Image: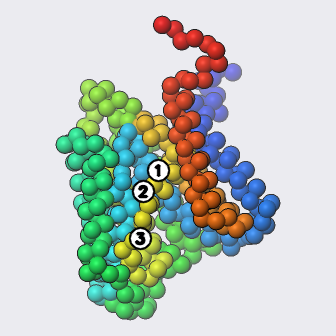
């Protein structure tokens, strides 16, 4: 059969698909292994809680994956999460309706995204330095917005009925038996997946990550595309901030701490290359699930937090090492490279 007419081979030939499928296989193995050790892992309630918790990792994974594919990084993700939680909660404690609070929160996150995009794309600042700066600024805003203290319960401002509606929409409520948090994450996932895989913007994102100079010569607007990527990253982070606000029922200045690293982990475990140009959001979905299943399973078997972090760290390091090795064609098995 002609390979060009074989749908399965065409599917597997998609760049990054192999890594994504490997992550899904690893997910199944890990989930079954933990379930055999502790059958509580397989219960429906644990599965629902797992999907809800995973949704936060998926959203920040999408945020970081978009940036990583361009060959950059976003260290401000966690700070945007915290800023968004604080801004939305502060506004609601002042009696502002949740709808208006959400719009203002998303608008503030877009400002951060535009700033990151301009600093990296237009002014050529190293992304590590640029987003480190915006990370400190954004976290500072999270502290200042309510006078350097966590907010009161949002119900003190908007009332119990409205406050409960906000919390149910983003965290506690269910639709079709599944927590709304999961559905929110999946809607954003589908939109971002479509943008990355089916639009010209998506092709430009991959082009920049593969070779930014070649992308410029091909007519790609690097500044505009980079800015779009950072805006998407900031919006996804803001949604996570709203979720954390709904979960706690208040704003916490430290919300989202270290989430930028969790985003890197979700993307890299799923095959998104930190070197740019490669990766699929399907892999990010698998990576977020792997992360959450590991966290959930290790908790179920009574592993200490330190052990959990070591396990995750080893997996992330191995995933990056494998990507570097494969890119450098280090698996020569005795074959000499042509001079």
Image marks 2 and 1: residues in contact by CB distance under 8 Å: yes
Q: Is residue 54 visible?
A: yes
Label 2 SS = helix
Q: Residues within 10 Å of mark 2 (few under 14, many from 20)?
A: many
The residue indicated by pointer 1 is: 264
Image marks 2 and 3: residues in contact by CB distance under 8 Å: no
Residue 260's label in the rendered image is 2
Apparent side of residue 187 relative to residue 129 in the rendered image (left or right):
right
Question: Which residue is drawn at the image coordinates 53% and 78% (left, top)?
Answer: 172
304 and 277: which is toward the camera: 304
Residue 145's label in the rendered image is none
Residue 141 position, x and y percent, is: 26, 69
Question: Which residue is drawn at the image coordinates 64% and 15% (left, top)?
Answer: 334
2 or 3: tag closer to the N-terminus: 3
Label 3 SS = loop
Residue 299 position, x and y percent, is: 66, 67
């Amino acid at each position: 059969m002609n390979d060009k007419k074989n749908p399965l081979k065409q599917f597997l030939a998609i760049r990054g698909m192999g890594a994504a499928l490997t992550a899904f296989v690893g997910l199944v193995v890990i989930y079954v292994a933990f379930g055999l050790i502790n059958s509580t892992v397989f219960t429906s309630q644990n599965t629902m809680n797992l999907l809800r918790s995973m949704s936060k990792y998926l959203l920040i994974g999408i945020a970081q994956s978009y940036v990583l594919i361009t060959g950059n990084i976003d260290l401000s993700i966690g700070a945007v999460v915290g800023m968004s939680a604080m801004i939305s909660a502060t506004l609601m404690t002042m009696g502002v309706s949740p709808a208006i609070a959400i719009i203002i929160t998303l608008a503030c996150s877009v400002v951060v995204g535009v700033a990151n995009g301009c600093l990296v794309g237009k002014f050529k600042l190293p992304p590590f330095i640029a987003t480190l700066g915006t990370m400190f600024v954004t976290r500072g805003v999270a502290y200042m917005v309510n006078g350097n203290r966590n907010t009161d319960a949002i119900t003190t401002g908007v009332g119990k009925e409205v406050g409960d509606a906000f919390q149910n929409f983003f965290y506690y409520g269910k639709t079709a038996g599944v927590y709304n948090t999961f559905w929110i994450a999946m809607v954003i996932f589908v939109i971002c997946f479509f943008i990355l895989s089916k639009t010209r913007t998506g092709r430009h994102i991959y082009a920049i990550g593969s070779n930014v100079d070649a992308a410029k010569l091909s007519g790609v607007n690097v500044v505009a595309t980079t800015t779009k990527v950072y805006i998407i990253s900031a919006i996804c982070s803001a949604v996570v901030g709203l979720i954390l606000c709904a979960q706690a029922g208040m704003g916490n200045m430290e919300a989202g701490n270290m989430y930028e690293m969790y985003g890197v982990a979700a993307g890299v475990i799923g095959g998104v290359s930190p070197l740019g140009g490669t990766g699929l959001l399907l892999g990010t979905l698998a990576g977020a699930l792997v992360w959450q299943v590991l966290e959930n399973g290790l908790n179920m078997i009574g592993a200490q937090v330190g052990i959990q972090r070591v396990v995750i760290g080893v997996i992330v390091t191995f995933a990056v090492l494998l990507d570097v090795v494969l890119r450098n064609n280090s698996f020569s098995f005795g074959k000499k490279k042509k001079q």
